[in-house]
Image (cartoon, rainbow, N blue to C red):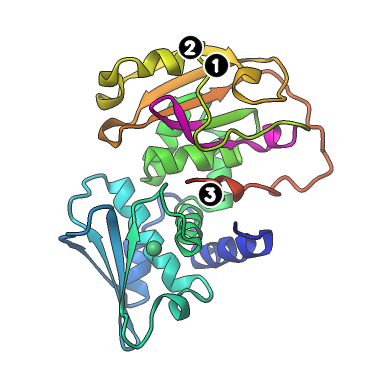
């Protein structure tokens, strides 16, 4: 688990790099170039490996797997490798005199702490707090908001959805699932602040009555990126949550084999810890992914 202090350090490392940026999207290729880091596409023979950071003496290079065709995912991969370059301690940890190439595994499965820190760095770099908060407040709600933000930031739907939950000022839960089981779940601060709410964990079942469960019965929905709208009760998803009807947007994530669910509502949910710093657990969304 990433400690709170470490999470702040990782976020600061990313925010420092983009502190002069005034508009989205952030261009990780330009950032690499400005530091003299060469970036190129490369054939990857190892399954699941999306990118590499290569060290040669004092010089660095980044490669990303050329089978990746989605620009959002390429940007995330390059930013992840930049994370290893910029996060304090990573270069020392990942490279030795004899080991000069670090290969990064595709996100959402990485149990390694350095990998999770680099993913958190990448999300912060491409969707920096001030610019992303402003964009989020103008984006609307549900999946259309996430799609709009992903277009604005040139980021993947999944990474944008997590960041959207982190910054949304209303009640939002983002759940990524496969085979009717939760991969990971991310709650907006309003839901995080509710006392006694248990976060869904990896492997928890999707509620049988939900639109998501019906959606997943047809694998074509997932493969073809179909979108459905429905509704379900918050307490059926989150143990200990109040019984509130939530809108439920469901989207197939394509050949990735996963389903994205966005639960949201316009209903006012009163914060139970109004005095607490609202960024308290934000980074946990990135840390909880497995
Ligand atoms: Zn990595």
Residue shown at 58% from the left, 23% from the top: 264
Q: Residues within 10 Å of mark 2 (few under 14, many from 20)?
A: few
User: Callout 1: helix, strand or loop?
Assistant: strand
**Quadrant containing the N terminus in the rendered view:** bottom right
Residue 172 relative to residue 64: left or right:
right
- Mark 1 and mark 2 in contact (Cβ < 8 Å)? yes
The residue closer to the viewer here, 196 or 81, is: 196
Position of 200 relative to 246 (above/below): below
Residue shown at 29% from the left, 53% from the top: 74
Q: Is residue 266 visible?
A: no
Q: Which residues are magenta?
A: 175-194
User: Callout 2: helix, strand or loop?
Assistant: strand
State the CA–CA distance, disc 2 to disc 3. Answer: 27 Å
State the CA–CA distance, disc 2 to disc 1. Answer: 6 Å
State the CA–CA distance, disc 1 to disc 3. Answer: 24 Å
Q: Which residue is mark 1?
A: 247
Position of 165 relative to 246 (above/below): below
Quadrant of the image occupied by residue 278? top right
Position of 170 relative to 93 (above/below): above
Q: Is residue 227 visible?
A: yes
The x and y percentages for residue 213 are 43, 16
Give ligand 1's quarter of the image: bottom left
User: Callout 3: helix, strand or loop?
Assistant: helix
- Mark 3 and mark 1 in contact (Cβ < 8 Å)? no
**Sequence-earlier tag: 2 or 3:** 2
Q: Which residue is mark 3?
A: 286
Residue 212: mark: none
Q: Is mark 2 within 8 Å of ligand 1?
A: no
């Amino acid at each position: 688990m990433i400690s709170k202090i470490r999470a702040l350090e990782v976020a600061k490392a990313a925010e420092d790099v983009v502190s002069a940026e005034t508009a989205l999207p952030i261009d990780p290729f330009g950032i690499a170039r400005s530091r003299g880091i060469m970036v190129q596409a490369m054939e990857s023979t190892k399954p699941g490996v999306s990118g590499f950071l290569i060290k040669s003496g004092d010089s660095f290079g980044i490669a990303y797997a050329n089978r990746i065709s989605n620009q959002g995912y390429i940007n995330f991969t390059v930013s992840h490798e930049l994370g290893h370059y910029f996060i304090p301690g990573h270069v020392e940890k990942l490279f030795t005199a004899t080991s000069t190439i670090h290969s990064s595994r595709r996100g959402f499965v990485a149990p390694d702490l350095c990998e999770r820190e680099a993913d958190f760095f990448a999300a912060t770099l491409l969707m920096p707090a001030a610019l992303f908060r402003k964009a989020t407040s103008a984006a609307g709600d549900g999946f259309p908001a996430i799609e709009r933000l992903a277009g604005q930031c040139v980021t993947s739907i999944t990474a944008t959805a997590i960041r959207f939950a982190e910054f949304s000022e209303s009640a939002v839960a983002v759940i990524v699932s496969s085979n009717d089981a939760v991969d990971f779940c991310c709650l907006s601060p309003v839901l995080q602040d509710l006392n006694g709410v248990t976060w869904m964990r990896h492997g928890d079942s999707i509620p049988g009555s939900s639109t998501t469960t019906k959606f997943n019965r047809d694998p074509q929905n997932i493969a073809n990126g179909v979108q459905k709208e429905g509704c379900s009760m918050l307490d059926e998803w989150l143990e200990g949550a109040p019984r509130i009807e939530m809108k439920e947007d469901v989207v197939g994530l394509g050949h990735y084999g996963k389903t994205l669910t966005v639960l949201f509502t316009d209903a006012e949910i009163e914060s139970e810890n109004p005095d607490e710093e609202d960024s308290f657990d934000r980074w946990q969304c990135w840390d909880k992914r497995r």
